[in-house]
Amino acid sequence: MKALFYSLYVCGVVSLMLSCNNSEANLIETLDSDLSNIDYSEFEGKSLKEYGIPALIMLPDQTSNIGAAIEPEILHAEGDFKWEIAIGPNFTLKIEDFGNEKNMVQEEKDRLARIKFYTIEYLIDEADLIMYKRTLNYSEKAAGNESVGAEHVTYHCYGTREIDGITYVLRSRDEGFHKPIIETMVKTVMSLEKL
């Protein structure tokens, strides 16, 4: 009986891993073709007008893979240039108003290139959107110490959208998330559009 449950568990884990790899490939393929093909069936539209952004954004709903079944919380101080959208503990999207600044994604890539204690691998690399894997570098000498040698990998996204001549940066939190969360977040970033 234990062997049967173990076999089913292993099959489930392998299926999940394969579906995560396929979802990344599908997301990248969609970016390379037509953004209107993105599947937003597990998302709900939310107007940001009452928070000072004349735009609609698609946020993951209770059926999505973010592990939360609660309403989105939008944090914004009146007159501030920053917003935070939180949906449970696993989804936090930060939005910042950069006025008429351009090339913000390239500036972020330049900033990341200067950080030497991480290796950055771009999974999506577009002029207005990046999704990347960040791996902590550690020396082989330190690898002998079990507390130092543990691999630390996180996933992140950073994108821009222009609404009424204002550049908005939409990004994941600094600590990053697991890959499926960031893939969902990338869809949210790409969805921001003028009302």
Image (spheres, helix red, strand yellow):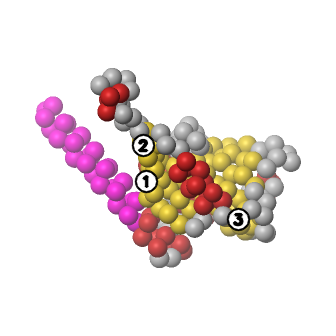
Question: Foreground residue, 150 or 58?
Answer: 150
Local SS, label 2? strand
Residue type (three-letter) at the residue carrying disc 1: Glu
Q: Are marks 3 and 1 in contact (CB under 8 Å)?
A: no
Q: Are marks 2 and 1 in contact (CB under 8 Å)?
A: yes
| Residue at the spot 72% in from the left edge and 52% down from the top edge | 96
Q: Looking at the picture, how far across and down is residue 111, in whole percent?
A: 59, 50
Q: In the image, is 45 to the left or to the right of 100?
A: left
Would you name the residue on which mark 2 appears? 135
Q: Between disc 3 and disc 1, whose residue precedes?
A: 3
- State the CA–CA distance, disc 3 to disc 2: 28 Å
Q: Are marks 3 and 2 in contact (CB under 8 Å)?
A: no
Would you name the residue on which mark 1 appears? 121
Find residue 129 and report its image quarter: bottom right
Q: Looking at the image, can residue 12 be seen? A: yes
Would you name the residue on which mark 3 appears? 102
Magenta region's main secondary structure? helix
| Residue at the spot 44% in from the left edge and 58% down from the top edge | 123
Find residue 143 and report its image quarter: top left
